[in-house]
Structure formats: structure tokens, C-alpha cells
Amino acid sequence: MSALTSLQNSRGAEDAFPTVRSALADVAAQGTCLGATLRVLRRGVEILDIAVGDCGDGRGLTADTVVPWFSASKLAATVAVARAWELGLIQPSDQVVQYCPEFTGPGKDDIRIEHLLTHTAPLRTIDREVGRQFADGRDTLVQLILHGDADPDWVPGTRAAYLGHAGYLLLDEIVRRASGQPFSIFQREQVTVALRLRSELGGPHSADIAEVPWFGPAELAERIGRYDPKAGYPSACMAGPFADAATICEMLRTSGRHAGTPILQPTTCRTLITDHRPPALIDESAGTTRRWGLGIVLAAENFGPASTESFGALGGTANLVFSDPAAELTAALYFLGNAGSTDRLTRDQHVINALYHDLT
């Protein structure tokens, strides 16, 4: 079945969003993914939820397909951490060592929870080792982080580099010790159940999680391929319909409310989506400045023409979700295919540009 003929409209008029539909079919036909899904909310109302392509195993890709979220998992984990501080269990300014006394050594004593969320903690070397040992299990990785050495010549908060796993595994351990619950259970109660999501850490019970093929440079294929979502790490192991990511972002956009129910306080939401990095700070993993709230990326170039107020998350090179308060818009876009960074940015912007075009 061709990408174009398998275009489905789960909800919405068939003739709506013609530029978006064409863009999705174009991308699927270019060979950097098997298909794509897109969910869009405007002023709190779902206006689009569509899919194009298939899963590569004979199944059509739909808006309900269970997919791995990769690093967009941090969006759900961040909300769980925010609930922990609203419950008085932790505070962003707390030192990690307050909860994990064994987390000591040069450069580590003043690492605070906020540094883990802004990716400004001196843990880049440890993080790379965690990535190499991803399959060794949560407890082994947590011990590696707790007892590893911090990067030298790095005062927490003064340098930045994306931490794929180490920061959120530490947050997992901090919340576990503070709450007395495994992080997976805490997140399920505070995020999955509260927001009525179908997605969970490790994936829904007995779910068949779609495999996301690699279309990028061969030398990077192994790095993505070894991240099994069933490991359940908060940094990269959320799985379920990616439409759920839009639900989380929309909750943050609407000051913490979902279906009329308060999930987070408005002040907490504002704190999460306010820039917490110095303006000129270079992100050493990106080679350029990058704005970050607490656990939330701000105004990413992948969001196309979205306003400077936009915020959201990116996962692998497969997905993005963002809210644009200026446009009262939230969108979750998933490509069933990890690609090289250039292809990823091109296809992200192509579809999001098409979305804004159709909305004008």
C-alpha cells in the first residue's frame, strides 16, 4: 500500500488541511520513515488526528498505534517530578545529596534538582556511560550515576549539554526515596491516570509496541536501536499512542487543567515553561544556544513558525510535540522512522509549516 493511498483521517473532514495531508504523504514517500501521525488541538478542541503509511509488518499505522516516545518520555516524567514538588516531597532548588547521601565528590555536592531538569549538571561523561550500558537495568545504572565522577571544570548551572538518561534516572531515584514509591508507579498515578492517558512507562500492559526503523547514518544506528522502551526508564521509555503527548502539552498550555480538572498549579506550569538557562549559554551537545525550562525545551527550531512562547519535547529523531500559546495550538507529530538530524529537521519543519499554512 502506498503512503498516499493509506492516508487516513481518524477525525475531521476529509477535505480539511490539504497542505498538511500533502506534506505528510510527501515525507512518507521520501524514504525517511514508514509513515506518520499528527494530532492537533486548537483552543482546546481536537481539530485533526490523522495517520499516513504503515508499520512495515502489514499493519496500517493509525493514530492509536503504540509507539516508543524516546526522549519525549521526559515530558511525562517532568510532570511527575512537578507533582512531587507540589506535594511537598522535593523542591527544584534542593541538592541531590539531600536525598542521595552517597552522591558526593568533587563537583557533585551542589548539583540541584533544577540542574538535572535543565541539563546543566556536570554529568555528561557519566551519561555517555549510561547510554552504553542501557540494557544493564535500572538499579545498575543508578549506582553508576550515584558513584561516578562529575565532569571536571564544570560548575553546575554554568555549562549545558543534553543528558539522555543520567539526569532523569537520578530524578527517578530522588522521587522514589522521597515518595516511598517506585517512580513508575508514582508517574502512573500522577500523570497516566490523572490525564487518562493510554501511554505508560514501558508501554501499556501486553501492548505490541511498533518498531521504529533507522533511516539515518549507519554509524548511529546502534545507539538508537538498543533503547528498549520496556526497560521503563523515565528518560526514554514511555510508549503508547503519541497523541497522548499532545494531551500533556495542552494541559501545560491551559495552566495545568485537563477536562476541567486541575492537574498542576498555574504557577508550576509557568515555572516549567520559563527559561532557566543563561541567555548566551551554549548547549555543548547542540553547538548553539538552546532555551530550556525545567524539563521542557523552549522554542525549538523543529517547531517551524511557532512563536517564541512555544514549548514542548523531542524524541529520538522520530517525534516532536509542542504547544504555541500565541496560536492557542498544540500538535504532536510522529514519524515511524528515526532519521539523520538534517532529514529530521527538514521533515519536521515541512509538516509544521504546512500546518500553520492551513490554519491561516
Image (cartoon, rainbow, N blue to C red):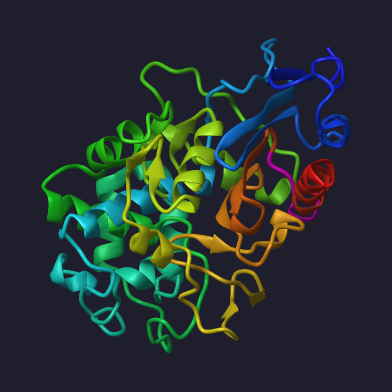
Identify the image quadrant of the N terminus.
top right
Residue nearest the viewer, comparing 104 with 62: 62
Tally the numbered discs: 0
Q: Residue at x 87, y 21 (%)?
A: 4
The quarter of the displayed image where residue 282 is located? bottom right
Q: Is residue 141 visible?
A: no
Quick check: 356 above or below 124? above
Q: Is residue 191 left or right of residue 284?
A: left
* Bounds of the magenta segment: 338-343
The quarter of the displayed image where residue 303 is located? bottom right
Residue 203, position as x, y percentages in the image:
41, 28
Q: Is residue 324 left or right of residue 54?
A: left
Residue 266, position as x, y percentages in the image:
36, 58
Q: Residue at x 41, y 79 (%)?
A: 151
Residue nearest the viewer, comparing 160 with 52: 52
Residue 234, position as x, y percentages in the image:
37, 46
Residue 11, position as x, y percentages in the image:
66, 20
The quarter of the displayed image where residue 191 is located? top left
Quick check: 241 above or below 54? below
Residue nearest the viewer, comparing 16 with 123: 16
Q: Residue at x 42, y 85 (%)?
A: 154
